[in-house]
Image (spheres, rainbow, N blue to C red):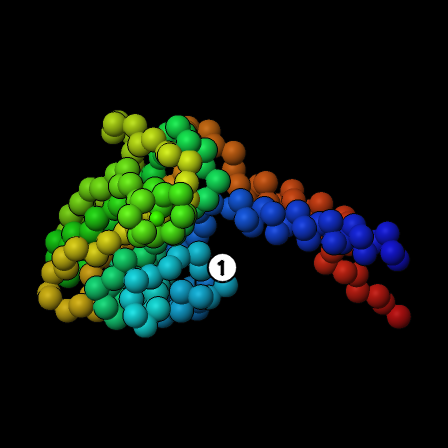
């Protein structure tokens, strides 16, 4: 029993350290999954477990749409996000653990809602304090993207000048710049985002498979418990 508990603790420790290293998550906005198979939309707090993203909106709301709601197909998977939830806002993630001099890659899809919408992607090294601001931040990349409401635009770092990490925590931000219609709660759909070292490489290690293997290992260690039958 004691041995099993220590194995369980070891496995949980591994899981926590994996989480600490898990850089960029939920880039395709598939979590939390809501109303499967139904075209709908919903709002989640940016403190929702597993959502990954933070917002600059003062109400902390992140707006997710499911595939084909109001006739808009997801670019990838079954869900996507609207940058303008209730306010003109920015969705971002802070990524730690990328070594200095690493070359950073990204990709994402963007689409207008009522017409041509414009967003900006910023990649910022947060400096020695690893916090946004404080006078030590360095903008490594900044560019604006405009897309209308007839098709998704898909963008990658391929072919751009290399974006070189400085070794501190990085903030990857989608900033709503302008949206057709002038309603602050409307505009700038995003989907299929990824960011990190080698994310655009032709044969990346499939993360879901790695997690499946890890899950199997946990199951083998009895972490998920066993249901006893009478
Ligand atoms: Ca998606
Ligand atoms: Ca909205
Ligand atoms: Ca800083």
User: Quadrant where the C terminus lies?
Assistant: bottom right
Asked if residue 65 is positioned above or below residue 12 in the image, the reply reads below
Q: Give the residue displayed 28% in from the left and 37% down from the top.
A: 140
Secondary structure, mark 1, is: loop
Left or right of 95 in this view: 184? left
In terms of depth relative to the viewer, which is nearer, 122 or 28?
122
Q: Give the residue displayed 39% in from the left and 57% down from the top.
A: 53
Q: Where is residue 101 in the image (x, y as percent from the top left)?
A: 39, 28
Q: In which quarter of the image is residue 72?
A: bottom left
In terms of depth relative to the viewer, which is nearer, 77 or 205?
205
Q: Position of residue 214 (x, y in %)?
A: 65, 44
Q: Position of residue 145 (x, y in %)?
A: 18, 45
Asked if residue 144 is positioned above or below residue 71 in the image, the reply reads above
Task: Please give the residue where the numbered disc 1 appears in the rendered image.
Answer: 50
Left or right of 73 in this view: 46? right
Q: Quadrant of residue 223?
A: bottom right
């Amino acid at each position: 029993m004691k041995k099993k508990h220590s194995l369980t603790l070891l496995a949980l420790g591994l899981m926590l350290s994996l989480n600490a290293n898990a850089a960029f998550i939920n880039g395709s906005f598939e979590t939390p999954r809501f109303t499967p198979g139904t075209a709908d939309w919903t709002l989640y707090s940016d403190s929702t477990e597993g959502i990954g993203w933070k917002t600059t909106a003062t109400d902390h709301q992140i707006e997710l749409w499911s595939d084909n709601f109001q006739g808009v197909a997801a670019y990838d998977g079954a869900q996507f996000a609207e940058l303008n939830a209730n306010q003109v806002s920015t969705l971002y993630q802070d990524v730690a653990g990328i070594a200095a001099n690493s070359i950073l890659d990204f990709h994402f899809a963007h689409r207008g809602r009522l017409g041509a919408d414009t967003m900006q992607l910023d990649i910022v090294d947060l400096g020695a304090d690893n916090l946004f601001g404080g006078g030590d931040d360095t903008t490594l990349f900044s560019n604006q993207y405009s897309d209308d409401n007839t098709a998704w635009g898909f963008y990658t770092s391929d072919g751009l000048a290399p974006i070189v990490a400085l070794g501190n925590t990085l903030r990857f931000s989608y900033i709503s710049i302008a949206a057709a219609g002038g309603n602050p709660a409307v505009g700038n759909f995003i989907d299929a985002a990824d960011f990190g070292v080698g994310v655009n490489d032709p044969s990346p290690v499939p993360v879901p498979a790695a997690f499946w293997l890890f899950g199997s290992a946990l199951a083998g260690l009895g972490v998920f418990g066993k249901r006893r039958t009478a």
